[in-house]
Image (cartoon, rainbow, N blue to C red):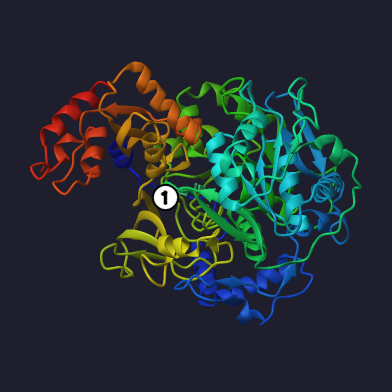
């Protein structure tokens, strides 16, 4: 299915969401939430989080600074600890939920399941905290985590939060080069990894990828210690401590530690974590999220968007009917996992689910098998996963009892109406709310989403802004806000919200240039959108050079710099192409340095160069080698033309006579044609 076909499907059908409250009261509540955002979030901060000391300035002083100069701060002077709020407080009065399950982990094999209670989680997090401190980690240090999807990943994130260290999680699909870049950028002295992980029956050699990263000159002198958890299986742990100077066998060290470790009281504006994401340049940005604002936003949006409430008392083992079983099947290495696997659910005292495997292992019924076995009520995944499962038809989901489901979430990219309807009809049996959550690494949590049971749904629209989020649609040329609907333009946010990233690590000018300066007074998302006559938002995709491949954000410039780093490549231009399953695919055009002929072996090397530089998830869909690229007479590559050729939209290529050599276009059309 091509992109235009996706858009042509009748998107205007409206589904009600087993509505229990009128939409008008939701809209009124939203309007009042943005009338005075400082008081709105201040009241929630006081009622939802436990503080060691309240922030200064009262309700009206919770917010200070502005979007114009990027000086936003929330709850400044307030002292709290996120690990205390996500773990410890639930172990004692008034919650007394120490025996309730905090994490359900399902490993690569469906038979490997662990249930960890809040008490157990607290003790293990304390042991890890003590082990990190024993190894030298101190408040403010950046700890890089390169881990499989095992409970120790969440526990180590929480341990960092507990002792005031700043975690920087790198998704386990990134290459050694990408890890080295991030360690260097963050000046991270400590790395936590595991000897290996598992995914879809395959072994991920995480320690050896990490070893490769830290042996690179640019980070060899930065990293002081590498803490290596044992793998969950036998065999991967055959390395000797002491032989490799920096490495510490972490599993036995953690086991030998005391299960008590006091929380460090942090300022609300102290950084909680860094997460790298892609932008328009080749260099990934380390976005910095803070302690108080992020925690509150993660907690509140988890509860609102999925209709979950904070668990305030111990669960009754005889009556589980009022307990939700919440499962977000993302990887904790991305922002979705940070906010909606680790922090959001645990801050609400819910039980969260960690899934190590893939939707296809051992077969395409894996998700639905999990829903049945665990009685999952809220299930949260990405459109790519839905589209790829849809291809296998309705038989797999129909084999399982999916009647426990109540809410189906989607995230990461626009969901096309056909996939939405399959999710709604086949998985949800026409009974569940499909919650389309729009947000970004930068926003920390949902900024647009329908509320289950409240917002009528339109397949393909993420609907209306979340509480406390003041959205604006701007005219991209004048920068003026379009107040009327329907409207089409770029999406921006006009008042600060607590979950927003505060800076790019070590480069506040870049933060300002990307988010605050394009439209002064607004936070610019980088997305285009349409707002319909009901005020519903329809995301039309990125308006910058960022691709969204299977929900993974990849900068075209990152792929280009991976290609031009290869000795044979003279020029590279990367564009997105519509892709039936992945949403977008990657098309690379390259010219070679003279003397290097195009051979199959060389082109294979180029695919490999991208995998090595970034990671396998960024593997190009096609690499087109040609003697020249379409350039203007002033020497600028015409990416617009390259995009049209790659997407076979030849009738809208436009005028090519201004090119320095128009015949290049015909050559490229022939070459691209061979891929189809
Ligand atoms: O283009 C939007 C798209 O994903 C981008 C953010 O990517 P990332 O920071 O990696 O975060 C992904 C998980 C939140 C956005 O700029 N995007 C995210 N959610 C949606 C979406 N596009 C349409 N609909 C969504 N629900």
Residue 94 coordinates in the image, percent (x, y):
86, 62
Q: Which sits in the foreground, 368 or 660?
A: 660
For residue 223, above or below residue 206: below
Q: Which residue is at the far top? A: 600
Above or below, comparing residue 53 to residue 211 in the picture: below
Could you say whether the residue bearing mark 1 is in a helix, strand or loop?
Answer: loop
Quarter placement of the C terminus: top left
Q: Position of residue 299 (x, y in %)?
A: 66, 58
Residue 279 position within the rendered picture, expressed as x and y whole percent measured from the top left: 43, 50
> Depth check: 285 or 650 in front?
285
Asked whether, in this view, residue 624 is left or right of residue 562, the answer is: left
Q: Which residue is found at the position 41% from the left and 60% from the top?
A: 514
Q: Which residue is mark 1?
A: 461
Quadrant the N terminus occupies: top left
Judge from the rendering whether residue 317 lies leftward or rightward of residue 584; answer left or right.
right
Tell me, yes or no, if residue 429 can be seen here.
Answer: no
The image quadrant that residue 492 belongs to is: bottom left
Q: What is the tally of numbered marks visible in this picture? A: 1
Q: Residues within 10 Å of mark 1 (few under 14, many from 20)?
A: many
Q: Residue furthest left?
A: 657
Q: Residue at x 60, y 46 (%)?
A: 183
Q: Is residue 32 visible?
A: yes
Percent from the top left, x then y, of residue 329? 61, 38
Residue 385 appears left or right of 271? left
**Vertical arrangement, residue 382 with respect to residue 625, above or below:** below
């Amino acid at each position: 299915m091509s992109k235009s076909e996706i858009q042509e499907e009748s998107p205007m059908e409206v589904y009600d969401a087993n509505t229990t409250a009128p939409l008008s009261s939701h809209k009124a509540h939203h309007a009042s939430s943005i009338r005075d955002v400082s008081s709105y979030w201040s009241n929630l901060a006081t009622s939802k989080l436990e503080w060691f000391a309240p922030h200064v300035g009262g309700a009206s002083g919770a917010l200070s600074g502005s979007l114009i100069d990027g000086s936003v701060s929330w709850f400044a002077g307030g002292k709290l600890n996120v690990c205390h709020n996500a773990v410890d407080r639930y172990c004692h009065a008034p919650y007394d939920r120490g025996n309730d399950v905090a994490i359900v982990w399902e490993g690569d094999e469906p038979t490997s399941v662990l249930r960890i209670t809040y008490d157990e989680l607290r003790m293990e997090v304390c042991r890890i905290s003590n082990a990190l401190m024993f190894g030298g980690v101190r408040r403010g240090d950046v700890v890089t985590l390169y881990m499989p999807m095992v409970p120790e990943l969440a526990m180590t994130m929480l341990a960092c939060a507990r002792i005031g260290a700043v975690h920087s999680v790198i998704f386990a699909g990134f290459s050694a080069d990408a890890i080295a870049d991030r360690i260097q950028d963050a000046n991270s002295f400590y790395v936590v990894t595991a000897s290996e992980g598992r995914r879809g029956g395959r072994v991920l050699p995480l320690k050896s990828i990490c070893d490769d990263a830290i042996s690179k000159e640019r980070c060899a002198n930065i990293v002081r210690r590498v803490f290596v958890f044992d793998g969950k299986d036998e065999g991967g742990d055959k390395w000797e401590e002491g032989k490799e100077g920096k490495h510490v066998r972490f599993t036995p060290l953690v086991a030998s530690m005391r299960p008590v470790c006091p929380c460090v009281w942090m300022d609300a504006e102290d950084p909680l974590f860094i997460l790298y994401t892609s932008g328009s340049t080749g260099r990934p940005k380390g976005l910095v999220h803070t302690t108080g604002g992020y925690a509150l936003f993660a907690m509140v949006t988890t509860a609102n968007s999925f209709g979950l409430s904070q668990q305030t008392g111990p669960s009754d083992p005889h009556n589980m009917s009022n307990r939700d079983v919440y499962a977000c099947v993302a990887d904790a290495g991305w922002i979705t996992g940070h906010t909606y696997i680790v922090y959001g659910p645990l801050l609400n005292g819910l039980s969260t689910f960690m899934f190590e495997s893939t939707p296809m292992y051992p077969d395409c019924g894996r998700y639905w098998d999990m829903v049945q076995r665990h009685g999952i009520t809220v299930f949260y995944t990405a459109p790519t996963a839905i589209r790829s499962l849809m291809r296998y038809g309705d038989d797999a989901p129909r084999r399982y009892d999916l009647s426990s489901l109540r809410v189906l979430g989607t995230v990461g990219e626009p969901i096309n109406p056909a996939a939405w309807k399959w999710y709604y009809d086949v998985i949800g049996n026409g009974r569940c709310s499909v919650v389309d959550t729009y947000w970004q690494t930068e926003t920390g949590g949902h900024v647009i989403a329908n509320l289950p049971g409240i917002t009528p749904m339109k397949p393909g629209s993420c609907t209306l802004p979340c509480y406390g989020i003041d959205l604006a649609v701007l005219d991209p040329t004048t920068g003026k806000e379009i107040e009327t609907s329907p409207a089409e333009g770029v999406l921006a946010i006009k008042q600060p919200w607590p979950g927003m990233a505060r800076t790019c690590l070590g480069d506040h000018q870049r933060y300002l240039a990307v988010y605050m300066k394009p439209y002064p007074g607004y936070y610019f998302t980088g997305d285009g959108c349409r707002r319909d006559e009901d005020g519903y938002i329809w995301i039309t995709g990125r308006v910058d050079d960022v691709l969204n491949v299977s929900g993974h954000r990849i900068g075209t410039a990152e792929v280009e710099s991976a290609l031009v780093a290869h000795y044979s490549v003279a020029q590279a231009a990367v564009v997105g192409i519509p892709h039936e399953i992945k949403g977008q695919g990657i098309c690379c055009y390259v010219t070679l340095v003279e003397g290097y002929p195009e051979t199959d072996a060389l082109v294979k090397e180029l695919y490999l160069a991208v995998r090595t530089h970034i990671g396998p998830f960024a593997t190009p869909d096609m690499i087109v080698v040609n003697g020249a690229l379409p350039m203007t007479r002033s020497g600028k590559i015409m990416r617009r033309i390259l995009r049209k050729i790659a997407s076979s939209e030849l009738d809208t290529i436009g005028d090519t006579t201004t090119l320095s050599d128009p015949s290049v276009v015909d050559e490229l059309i022939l070459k691209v044609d061979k891929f189809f």
